[in-house]
Every structure is written in C-alpha cells, then in structure tokens.
Image (cartoon, grey):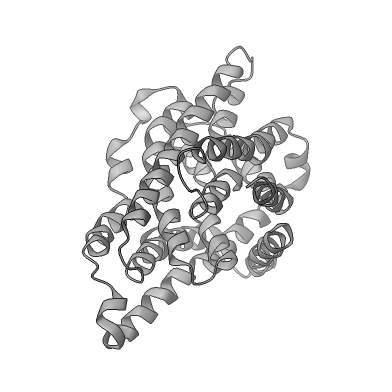
Amino acid sequence: MFLTSLENVLLLLAMAIPGFIIAKAKLIKNTDNVINFLSIMLLYVCQPFVTFNAFFNTDFDLNVFKNMLVVMALTVVIMTGFPILIKLIFLKSKDPELRSTVAYSAAYGNIGYLCVPFLQMLAPGNNLVLIYATSSIVAFNVCAWTVGNYILTGERKYIKLKNALLNPAMLSFIVSLPFFILNLNFNRVGGSMAGLARVFRVFAEMVGPLAMTLLGIKFSEMKIKEVITDYRVYIASALKLVALPLVGICLLLILNLFMDISSIRLNVMAIAAMPIATNLMMFSSLSGKDVKLAAKIVLMSTLFAIVTIPLALGLAEKIF
C-alpha cells in the first residue's frame, strides 16, 4: 500500500506541473480569473458529476447505505471534536492564529479536490469508494460552514447554515440518493444509456487534472522563503498529517469491535490523511483572518503529504 499510494500521490501532484509552468511563464494574463473559472468548474460541474457517476453506476445495497452513514458520522466526529480539542490546547497561546487558523487546519483536509482524484487513481472503477467519498464531502461541507467557521473566527455570525445545506455537493447528493435507493441506474437500463454514462464518467474524471492545474497556479504565486520560515506551518501540518491519521486509526480500531470496517477503511484513512483544505484560504478571506498564513499552510501541508499519505495508509494496512 505504501508504494502504491506514493506512486499515485506523485502522479497526482505531477498534474500540477503544467499549471505551475504556465503561470510562471506568465502565459496567463489574469491569474485570478483563471483560478476563479477552475474553481467554479470544480465546484459546480466536476464535483457533482463525481456523485452522479458513483451513484448512477452502483446497485443499491443496504450495507452500502449503512456504511455511507458511518462514514458521514466519522467525518463529523473528526471535523468537530479534533479542532475543538486543538483550540483548547492553544487556548492560552498569545498567537490568535494558533487558536483559530491552526485549529481549523488540524481537521479540515482537501477531501474534495485531492482525496477524490487520489481515490479514483488508487481504486480505479470502484464506485463504492467514491460513494463513501461523496458522503464524507457532504458531512465536510456541513461541518466546515458551521463548526469550522466558528472555530476559525470565534463568532457565530460566520456560521452559514444555508451554505452548509445548499451547496453543489449537498444538492447533487440529495438528487442522486433517491435514484440509488430505488435502484434506478445505468446498470438497470443497460446499453441504451451508455453514451450518457460516458459523459458522467468524463466529467467525474476531470476533477484530478483541473484541481491539480489550479494547485499548480497557486503554487507559482508563493514565495518559498516566506513559507518555510513560519513555524505555524509546521505545527498545522504535523497536526493534520500526523496526529489526525493516528486519530483515524484509533476510531477505526474502536469501530472494528462492532462492525466490518474493510469496505470503509480506505475512505476513513484518506479523509484523515489528506493535506489541509484549500477552502481555508476562502474562509480566512471572508472572515478577515490571515490569508497569507492560510495559503502557506495549504502549500506546505500538500508538499509534506507526498510522504505522509503513503505512510498513514501503509500503517493502517499493517494494523488492520
């Protein structure tokens, strides 16, 4: 698992190179517009099609539905309990960013734009893995816009329940779920919908290239010296990439006493092992927090993840 995960992480991050080169060569006239376009494509088109593609190519199974709920519940536990714990640890710190930005970073990983393409590469054609990934993304959005925003800002006015419930990930999940439960899918209708099934798959598989191109462009704007000299970057990265995967393993050990975790283990560990979510920059900007620090944390945690993701998944495989 270590070598396979390492290979796929490297291949995935290699997709960021063209975007980095294009931006560095100044072939893009307005970087902000390109980043905005790619973000819109990922959020409003590709991510929903990941959900559609997974659900419309999978036959209903009650155990799968139960596992979806378990993955959702574990995501909520991780993304509420862990950042609250970290915030309490840094409660007496004189640096307010340790109590907010770092606490948020400790639990909220890039499970939409990095975890999904990573799982697509690690488990090609496995729609169950993507169904569980979609379930975790739904839980992530609910937590991020509520508990996450409160952790980051300390103010209730930034809790956006409407945004938590009315976003592309949630809406595509709500649309797909009845079709899944009623077993209305491409498998049932056969070859008559093969063309539409291919369209769903193509859009779903665009997540990786577009997300990595976006990441490459963002990387091109960073000044490495500023990044590597900020100690808070290392604290946030250690909490997210080392401590949280260990928490994930502990949760799985507990859960393993009550159910078979073999089908959801990869998803839970991937959720825990992913680098810090890029939406940290967006939330920091909206709430007046330190956007530069957020960008540095996202960048460095992503680079560190090249090693830590394979280590976390490899350790979990040995334990279980």
The image quadrant of residue 51 is bottom left
Q: Residue at x 33, y 41 (%)?
A: 164
Nearest to the observer: residue 77 or residue 36: 77
- Residue 132 is left or right of residue 213, and the answer is left
The residue sitting at 60% across, 40% down in the picture is 249
Nearer the observer, 313 or 297: 313
**Can you see residue 291?**
no
Q: Which of the pair 53/315 is nearer the observer?
A: 315
Say which quadrant the N terminus sits in: bottom right
Q: Give the side of residue 186 with respect to residue 293, left or right.
A: left
Q: Is residue 51 visible?
A: yes
The residue located at (59%, 39%) in the rendering is 294
State whether residue 205 is above or below residue 266.
Answer: below
Q: How many marks?
A: 0
Q: Position of residue 55 (x, y in %)?
A: 34, 65
Q: Nearer the viewer, residue 235 or 39?
A: 235
Please state if 211 lies on the left or on the right of 154 as rendered: right
**Where is residue 3 shown, x and y percent of the image?**
74, 61
Give the farthest residue toward the bottom: 192
The spot of residue 237 in percent (x, y) is: 67, 38
Q: Position of residue 69 (x, y in %)?
A: 36, 46
User: Residue 295 occupies which quadrant of the picture?
Assistant: top right
